[in-house]
Image (cartoon, grey):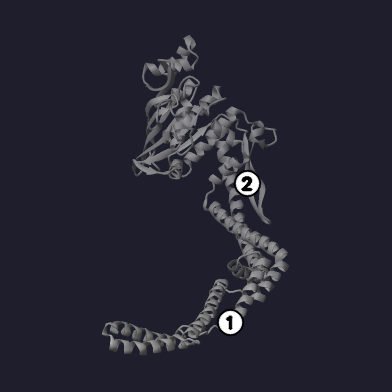
Amino acid sequence: MLELLRIRNLALIEDAELEFSPGLNALTGETGAGKSFIMRAVDFLMGERMDKKLVRPGAEKATVEALFVLPEGEAVIRRELSAETGRSRVYVNDALSSQPTIRDMGAQLVIHTSQHGQQKLLSPAFQAEILDSFLPDPSLLAERNDRLAVLNDVLERKRRLSEKFDDLQKQREFLEYQKKEIESVDPQPDEEDDLEERKKILKDRERAGECLQNALDILHGEVGMLDAMTLLNREMEIIARLFPGFEEDREAVETFRMRLHDLDNRLRRGPSDFDDDDPMSLDDIEARLFALARLKRKLRRGLDEIVDMKAEIDESLSFLDACALDMKSLGREEDKAAAGLREVLEKLNKARKKAAGELAIRIVDELTDLGFSEHVKVHFEFDARELYPGCEDMRGRLMWVPNPGQPAQPLDKIASGGELSRFLLALVTMRGHGDQDGQTKDARPSLIFDEVDAGIGGLTLNSVGKKLRNLADRQQMLLITHWPQLARMADRHFLIKKEVVDNATYTRCERLEGGDIKCELARMAGGGEQGAALAEKLCK
């Protein structure tokens, strides 16, 4: 039950607070005063979108806040709309929440029926939804959706498989050519870099061999350094004996001669890592690099890409070979999924037809109470919608005969605005009875009727009023109306009016009591003596 509603900085509403009664709450006022906009604020609170232009000029944000009484306790829901970004935030008991969460809660909190609902009622799709909402076992709908989703998933996988097969089949000859070219060269991952490194090493070794030989030639040539240093060392020994001051020079010559002998030995042995154990010669490496370069030119890709491409080609050709088996496997899945869908549709369609008969009787009873002729007839016709070959979803469509002797026709062909209002009221009444038996009045969702009494009058108005009153005795109702006959039944009456103060327009919400209610009823009745007389009569 909606106990309190507060609206701030929304359109013409600067700050309005409405404390509702558990029974019938009437909202009245001149056309354009903002009555429907208050109900629109409730819709915004329940997750509907709202344009940022509706934030009151000069305000940073608009806020709608409501206190609901629930079986498990009270809940405060607040939603804010930013004037700058148009984004909104929603809070439940001051904790940040999400719009999907609020929408899920909304069905348990509010049932909003407006003139827009009358237009929806003309839609065959909406009529089918109405019938489905009265199914005794709603799980059949969920099961149908699950089975259909499984079948659609199989069909989608089958479609993608078929498309891939067709595409690869067109490329098969080219793929086999590419595979043959790649296999003839058989490139390996990172092979090109490895060959270049080996090529560099072999060239370096070739150059090193030349240098070793040149160094040995210098040491052992016609005027070899080793022989020269031996002679020099012999002479330096004599000089040092004769002239001790040359002893240090003799030692240096001796040391250098010994270093040359050591160098000669190492040059003859060669460096320890100079062993050539590469099985490929430099010519072999050059030939292999040329083959790889030619393959890259043919396929117009880098070597790593070609190595990866070979795996992709193998996979594609294997796929083509195995595709027939995969298609057969998917075909079996499709048959199984279709059989499952067909089975649940048979149960669902049977349940719909049974529910349609029972619902039609209940609608007729409600319409009779609302002033329709006792001869009015209602039934559902079914249109088959093929979800898959052999799987038909029977969708119910409301047909009615308002007067004897007329053929049954859809609502949009013969129903007036007043008749649609009563149809909608009848459905909401039945929906209200549905699964709420045993619930307390506070636990049931609040009913909002936004001028659904449009287009009716006279005795019909009395029937509608009685129905609304009975409904309000069972659960809370918010009723926007222009009829004083309906407003006078309210447990609580609110007047919605516009005021201009200092060239600024405001929508005010005022709770009426006592004589103020009589004055408003007189206005609604047309004013003057006639309006006052009707108001006086209604207030007795």
Residue 265 seen by the camera? no
Instruction: Where is residue 225? Give x, y as percent.
Output: 44, 85
Q: Secondary structure at mark 2?
A: strand
Farthest left residue in view: 244
Q: CA distance from mark 1 to mark 2?
A: 79 Å
Residue 64 seen by the camera? yes
Q: Amino acid at mark 2?
A: Arg
Q: Secondary structure at mark 1?
A: loop
Q: Residues within 10 Å of mark 1 (few under 14, many from 20)?
A: some
Residue at 58% from the left image edge and 82% from the top image edge: 280
Q: Amino acid at mark 1?
A: Met
Mark seen at residue 280? 1
Nearer to the camera, 535 or 216: 216
Q: Which residue is mark 2?
A: 395
Nearer to the camera, 222 or 57: 222
Nearer to the camera, 41 or 420: 41
Q: Identify the image quadrant of residue 539.
A: top left
Residue at 37% from the left image edge and 43% from the top image edge: 96
Say left or right for 168 vs 200: right
